[in-house]
Amino acid sequence: MRVLLDEHLPVDLALELAGHDVDTVVGRGWAGIKNGDLLRRMSGDYDVLITMDRGIEFQHPIERFPFGVVIAHAASNRLQHLRPLVPAILAAIASITPGQVQRAGA
């Protein structure tokens, strides 16, 4: 799967998602752009967006996009708090369909 990590997630999280082609918002030069523009830009290039933004599904019509969104629920965006969620994130990536939102973590 082609995965995009939102800008507030650590770049090192990409190393934890073995078996997937992972880019970052920062690496693409898209840091600082609004979510709506980000979602439009990634259309056609990615299968999944991983974010910690819990409001994204209420602010944008995710069901209309050709990719899924995984929302990571962790105590912080530090790798030490995200690493325990990696199995749940990988499971979400494996089962997600376009336009779907899945959650990883509490």
Image (cartoon, grey):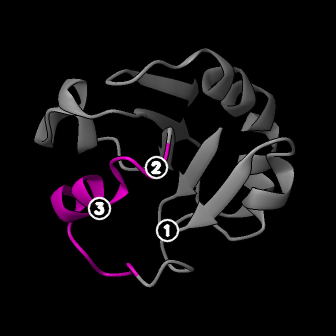
Q: Where is residue 104 in the image (x, y as percent from the top left)?
A: 59, 28
Q: Position of residue 33 (x, y in %)?
A: 25, 76
| Measured Cα–Cα span from mark 2 to mark 3 | 19 Å
- Is disc 2 in contact with disc 1, using a CB cutoff of under 8 Å? yes
Amino acid type, label 2: Met
- Tell me which numbered mark, 3 or 1, is placed earlier along the sequence: 1
Q: Residue 65 carries which label?
A: none
Mark 3 — residue? 41
- Crowdedness of circle 3 by 10 Å Cα count: few (<14), some, many (20+)? few
Q: Residue 52 carries which label?
A: 2
Asked whether residue 105 is drawn in magenta, I would say no
Image quarter in which the N terminus is found: top right
State left or right for residue 55 relative to residue 6: left
Circle 1 sits in a helix, a strand or a loop, which is it? loop
- Is disc 3 in contact with disc 1, using a CB cutoff of under 8 Å? no
Circle 3 sits in a helix, a strand or a loop, which is it? helix
- Tell me which numbered mark, 2 or 1, is placed earlier along the sequence: 1
Residue displayed at 12% across by 42% down: 59
Whether residue 106 appears in this view of the structure is: no
Asked whether residue 44 is drawn in magenta, I would say yes
Mark 1 — residue? 8
Image quarter in which the C terminus is found: top right
Residue displayed at 68% across by 56% down: 22
- Crowdedness of circle 2 by 10 Å Cα count: few (<14), some, many (20+)? many
- Residues in magenta, as a range: 30-46
Amino acid type, label 1: His
Q: Where is residue 8 in the image (x, y as percent from the top left)?
A: 49, 68
Amino acid type, label 3: Arg
- Tell me which numbered mark, 2 or 3, is placed earlier along the sequence: 3
- Is disc 2 in contact with disc 3, using a CB cutoff of under 8 Å? no
Circle 2 sits in a helix, a strand or a loop, which is it? loop
